[in-house]
Amino acid sequence: MPTQVLMPALSPTMEKGNLSKWLKKEGDKVKSGDVIAEIETDKATMEVEAADEGTLGKILIPEGTNDVAVNTPIATILGDGESASDADKASEPAAQNKSAQSAPPASAPEAAEAKPAPAKDAPEAPAVSVAADPEIPAGTEMVTVTIREALRDAMAEEMRRDPDVFVMGEEVAEYQGAYKVTQGLLQEFGASRVIDTPITEHGFAGVGVGAAMTGLKPIVEFMTFNFAMQAIDQIINSAAKTLYMSGGQLGCSIVFRGPNGAASRVAAQHSQDYSAWYSQIPGLKVVAPSTAADYKGLLKAAIRDPNPVIFLEHEMMYGQSGEVPKLDDYVVPIGKARVAREGKDVTLISWSHGMTYALKAAEELAKDGIDAEVIDLRTLRPLDTETIVASVKKTGRAVAVEEGWQQNGVGAELAARIMEHAFDYLDAPVKRVSGKDVPMPYAANLEKLALPSVAEVVEAAKAVCYR
Amino acid sequence: MAAPKKSAAKETGQDKESAPSKPRIPDFSKEQELHALRDMLLIRRFEEKAGQLYGMGAIGGFCHLYIGQEAVVVGMQMALREGDQVITGYRDHGHMLACEMDAKGVMAELTGRRGGYSKGKGGSMHMFSMEKHFYGGHGIVGAQVSLGTGIAFANRYRGNGNVCLAYFGDGASNQGQVYESFNMAELWKLPVVYVIENNRYAMGTSVTRSSAQTDFSKRGVSFNIPGEQVDGMDVRAVKAAGDKAVAHCRAGNGPYILEMQTYRYRGHSMSDPAKYRTREEVDKIRNDQDPIEQVRQRLLGLGMTEDDLKKIDAEVRKIVNESADFAQNDPEPDPAELYTDVYR
């Protein structure tokens, strides 16, 4: 059976082209790879190569023909022992069959546009179900530790538990951590599992992801998430997307952790809050706790999670102390917000260092007779909409408190979700308190102005309470 | 194409003038020649078919064909043992077939069907097979170099003796993370062979227009990584160099760089009119250096007939045609697959 040469589509958007020139004539021998014709599109002149070996049997579209639709048979190629009369047979009915079989590429998107699929045909996004916090048995001893120690303990416990867990980053080993978070790990686990890297964020993030693809469970420390901008391609394109792009074959259990957001007087390049950036990405989980117990329990959960987890810490909190239950294995599930303070008048929502403004503001508001509920999100992706909505249904008012910028921020997402799920319960529009829309200034007074303040949270809460 | 040079000769600077003294390339056995012919033909016929299906609109998006470069992956694969890993960039169909991934699964991924290696969610540039130790298929130029270094890191961490091949092109060789990876790989003596497929063009930009150092085997010099240039059109030369590099890595000596001097016959992608080079340049290499023709001629010299070789071609065409049939008839993914595989 002679094979047909079809008018090829040379890009996903090409619908037709001009057959400008035949470079072979009927009866010429061709082998695969030979250029047989030139076609012209609105973008360029392209060469058509033969994909089969044989003799050019019949030219069906003469040169100089304009607007030849993609997939139109333009010639036939005869195999061994086939004659031109075979080509005649092939060109007519078979041609129609063939073009009917293969959907023309150009018309397919058009058809889709003309008749959009009803939205209900699209499957529903799956609901996220999250286990509750672990029960802390009555009488459990509570130990006061710094957040720095809570993080170190979480890593040490997981490294004892699983030999596939290791930690890598700048100054994590011999220097004992730029912020002393990895203190003592080198001494306990040795240089093969506590690995000092060169200053090479993009490279070592990629090395971590590659190692994770083979089943190891790296903890990659960034000295700050500001430096992870060098590595963000590996975090998003390689770590977050590969499970999906591989149809579920190749996952990546990895934790990227380090301080995020504004420290103190380190100016614009060392002060950015990446909460909104990472929490936009499907495939990542994003955790940003505020208490010592949550720092420990959530880091343990992050290390065990089979997915890539962004673990956002805060330099201003490393030295803060808090109570952590003295249990063999205290793991806090990812994805569950915590009601940090119960109240009935207004819901203040924050996470990480933002919680310090929210909690202090709640105390101030109490003095004025406003009973604020404070929600600590703890996890930014998946976001615990249920806890937020339940609180707003109770209070009817909400203020989102965020150290990062307002545009496209987490606060914007919170406002949208509250509107979608609790619009009828709202007694006032949601307010956002956030970092100001400027790069972080260095001068002490300006830096203070650029960050949210307790006073701003109080003012916003009063505004939504019409007080 | 520059004559292949031995790394030992690279300091002399006189090899341009002197007659190209090819390094002695060990002969293949007849079985090796047949194996190489079959695997290279499979890649070529597969790619020709993929080009055809693209032209018919059955394959969408980007489609980067490997035609011309077949000897590189086939020769390197012959230097590996079970457990060794492979990772590459976006021009990946040849690597997958050389790893013995199923042609049907690869073609069905190109057409975006449920039987594709990534269930239709990855496409041409994103396929994987844990069974065959193939780690992709990566669409960001250069990313696979750090990832492959990480796979080698895991080999060393586990002490399993495996070696990772990280393939990338002359274009990716100018990405920063390549050198970040080189540094760590040599520092930590990681078992990774960096296979630079120098096909002379990064999309439309020739090596001489993009690279200050066009001898890619020297790209590891400041990290003390040994490297050599290899005639990437001769599958025997590729295998010999691969054997040496892999042995170096497996012995714990750290990474190795192989610059494969090769050529792609087709455009960068299907929509590339390839006006940055002449037709004569392409034809000359195709006529004088074609990797498949070289093996065919040697097999004819070993007493095989044209009919014997046609039979192999027919077998290969059958596999390719079956893969194309499967890829066009397999259903598209179930809509319910939209939300699966985001997390596990």
Image (cartoon, coloured by chain):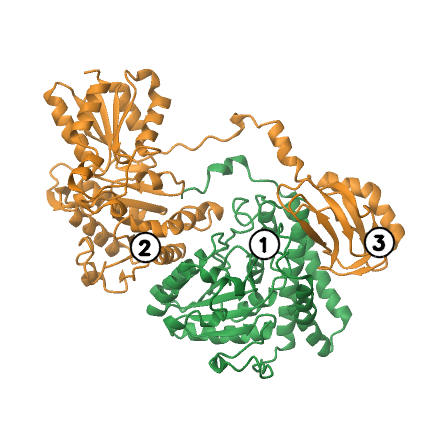
Note whether A199 is above or below A263 in the view shown: below
Residue under disc 1 on the same chain as residue under disc 3: no
Q: Which chain is orange?
A: A
Residue closer to the observer: B188 or A33: A33
Residue wearing tag 3 = A57
Give the side of residue A426 with respect to residue B341, left or right: left
**Amino acid type at image mark 3:** Gly
Q: Is residue A207 visible?
A: yes
Give the side of residue A426 with respect to residue B269, left or right: left
Q: Quadrant of residue A339?
A: top left
Mark 2 and mark 1: span between their CA atoms? 33 Å
Q: Which chain is green?
A: B
Q: Cβ–Cβ below 8 Å for labels 3 and 2?
A: no
Q: Secondary structure at mark 3?
A: strand
Residue wearing tag 2 = A218
Image quadrant in which the C terminus of chain B is located: top left
Residue depicted at x 60% and y 59%? B66
Q: Quadrant of residue A218?
A: bottom left
Residue under disc 3 on the same chain as residue under disc 2: yes
Q: Is residue B325 visible?
A: no
Chain letter belonging to callout 2: A
| Residue B188 picture location, percent across and down | 33, 68
Give the number of the mark in front: 3 or 2: 3
Give the side of residue B161 with respect to residue A332, left or right: right
Chain letter belonging to callout 1: B
**Amino acid type at image mark 2:** Pro
**Amino acid type at image mark 1:** His
- Name the N-terminal-most of marks 3 and 2: 3
